[in-house]
Amino acid sequence: MNKLNYFLLLLVLSATSHVVSATGYSVNGLSISYIRVVGDYPGTVYDNSIELHFAAIAWPEGSSCSGVRVYIDADNSHMVSAAYAAYIAGMTVDIYADDALPMRGPNCELSYMDINKP
């Protein structure tokens, strides 16, 4: 791992957050395929979001979430940094998506994300 990766991981570890939500779904061991950054999109559904795309997500039965992407509101800069750090370092992530938070189409917003060592 090069110095940039170490710096990004250190940055992520220094910015912690605790989020509690009433309902949600956990999926583990995912590799981020790519990250899409959305600014001012036609309409307001996808404005100012960061989309994490995966090859596949096996959502638990009963989940309102679907598809192969989840999103992070761009205001959650600590989560955005963590997503980029995981992507750059090639690490897998465990996600917790909450369908009680605003949905963007069939895609859920992340409440939290764990970064796993390889």
Image (cartoon, rainbow, N blue to C red):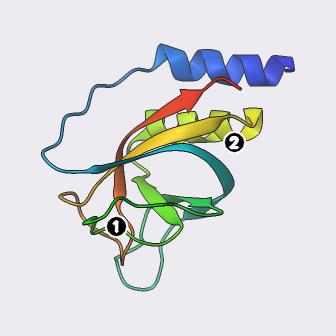
Residue 95 image point, x, y percent = 44, 44
The answer to whether residue 27 is visible is: yes
User: Are there few (<14), some (14-19), or many (20+) residues within 10 Å of tag 2?
Assistant: many
Please indicate whether residue 18 sits to the left or right of residue 39 in the image: left
Could you say which disc has been placed on residue 55 in the image?
none
- For marks 2 and 1, give the CA distance: 22 Å
- Residue positioned 64% across, 40% down in the render: 84
- Residue positioned 36% across, 78% down in the render: 105
Please indicate whether residue 38 sits to the left or right of residue 95 in the image: right
Q: Residue 91 sits in which quadrant?
A: top right
Foreground disc of the pair 2, 1: 1
Check contact, mark 2 vs mark 1: CB within 8 A.
Answer: no
Could you say which disc has been placed on residue 65 in the image?
1
The answer to whether residue 49 is visible is: no
- Residue positioned 27% across, 69% down in the render: 64
Could you say which disc has been placed on residue 87 in the image?
2
Residue 8 image point, x, y percent = 67, 24
